[in-house]
Structure formats: C-alpha cells, structure tokens
Amino acid sequence: MKIGAMNNPRANIYKEIEWIAKNGFDFIDLTLEPTASLHSQVDIKKVKAHINKHGLGVVGHMGDWALPKESHFPALREVSKQEIINTMRALAAAGAKKITTHSFERKRTKYKIAEKYCYELYKDLVKEAKRLGVTLMVENGGIDYAYNLDNRRLYASTLKRFPELKVHIDVGHANIGVKKNTVGQFFKKYSKRIVHIHFSDNRGKKDSHLRFGSGTVKWKEVIKTLKRYGYDSTITVETFRSGRKGEKESMKKLRRWWAAY
Ligand SMILES: [Zn+2]
C-alpha cells in the first residue's frame, strides 16, 4: 500500500512537491486545477522532473468537477470535454498512469438526457485514455451521490457501459447522507475495479475533509474492509481542512492502522 498527498492547486506546485516528498509520502496525487496549477499554467516537463528528482510516484487528478460538463448548452459540454482531455494529456506527460474523473451528476434534467451527455463525454475520454496508455478512474460523488439514487444509477450504468473505466473510492464521500458508510457496498460490487482511494473524515453531512478521527468514519472497519478484499494500491490522505499538520498526522495514523488491523 502506498500513501500520497494532493498538492494545493492554489499554491506553488514545486514547493508542494517538495513538502510532500520531505514529509514521508510515497506519491503525489497531482491535481491540475485553478488557480495556480491548471495544465496551461504549469510547465509539465519541469513538474515531471521535480517529481522524479524527489523520488515520488504520481497519480493524476482533474478539476472536471468544476466544469459545466452536465450543461444543456452543447458548446459548454464540448469545451468541458476539451479541457478534460488537455488535462489528461498533461497528467500523462507528468508520468501519471491512473487519472481521476469525477462522477457525472444528474442536475436539473431528466435521467435519460443526463445519461446521454455522460456517455457522449466518456466515449471520447476512454478513447483518449487508451491513446495515452493511461487508466481512467471515476470517483464516487459527494452529497448528491448519497442522496440521489439517479446519480448512483448513472454511476453504475457508466461503469457498465465502459468496462475500461476503473473505480476510485472516496471514503469521505461514501460517508455523506447515509446511515452506514458505503465503502463496503462499493467493494462488494466493484472490488476488482477499485484502483485508487481517497481518505478523509467528516460528520456525515458535508464533505469536510477533516483529519482521521475527527468525524464519524469508522476507520478500523474501513481498513479491515480494504484488507479483506486484498486492496494494496494507492491511498491519498485528503484531509486538507486540517492543514499540513493534520495531513501528516493522518498519514502516520494510516501507516499504524495498516500494520495493526
Ligand atoms: Zn476525493
């Protein structure tokens, strides 16, 4: 199992890489997002060299959650797709072999229309991922996923339609609006396709990104579930609400728990 941290996309990317390496993480969950780390704002060759120099692995993360990819305006969907493709290319050039997209959310539209937009998008993304030789993952959404059964249905149907897609589970998202964290359900359904995980805590109402132990996530149960299914890949500590100190503390806890449970 490898533990990573995400760069703050509003901060200097080189300093972020240095902090992550210096503090004992194995990889960077490289996110190319506004306001300082968009694919068009960074020199990707230099970023790759810096990551390599500091001996970090790299997983890719995109800001597609903030794009109008679900819009009824075809031009906005098209420009979103282009932006996602450009980000994928930059992440692949930085050395990422696994890249995260965020689940398509049915907003104020009919299910069938959302499904059509979603399929149109992923058809091209899957093609581009193949060309680049990378694995594209879909991260389970936050509050909408837990509350809205149509989003859950759309998530499942997208994965069914595109067998090349892999699953990225965010344990914090799986804790929102539900009686019991749904990580177990995800593993039951997708265990062979889960290739990346995000860890953060919350109190079940919003995606608060707290340090482990400050919310209601039952970490012992979560880790036992991962181990039961033989999960041994990348886990990102995504507790940015608790600052760098909280991230480091959470990383150490995770190493301890992983050895103990
Ligand atoms: Zn996440």
Image (cartoon, grey):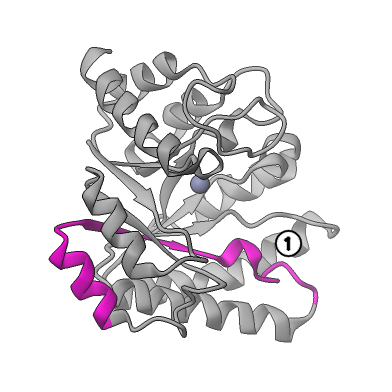
- Asked which secondary structure carries label 1, the reply is helix
- 182 relative to 7, above or below: above
Q: For the residue carrying disc 1, how many other residues have a C-alpha within 10 Å: few (<14), some (14-19), or many (20+)?
A: many
Q: Classify the position of the C terminus by image quarter.
A: top left
| Image x and y of residue 32, in percent | 45, 69
Residue 259 % position (x, y)? 21, 19
Q: Is residue 217 left or right of residue 208?
A: left
249 and 60: which is toward the camera: 249
Query: How many numbered marks are there?
Result: 1
Q: Amino acid at mark 1?
A: Ala
Residue 16 at x, y percent in the picture: 36, 60
Residue in the image at 65% along x and 65% along y: 66
Judge whether 190 appears above or below 123 on screen. Answer: above
Residue 117 seen in this snapshot? yes
The segment highlighted magenta reads 45-72
Query: Is residue 46 a member of the stretch shown in magenta?
Result: yes
Can residue 98 be seen here?
no
Residue receiving disc 1? 114
Q: Is residue 185 magenta?
A: no
Q: Which image quadrant is residue 67 in?
A: bottom right
If the image is split into quadrants, where does the N terminus sit? top left
Left or right for 168, reference 172: left
- Residue 11, compared with residue 90, is above or below; it is above
Q: Is residue 153 left or right of residue 61?
A: right
Query: Which residue shows up at 30% across the image and 19% down it?
Result: 257
How far across and how far down the image is residue 19, in percent?
30, 54
Q: Residue at x 50, y 35 (%)?
A: 200
Which of the 4 image quadrants contains residue 256? top left
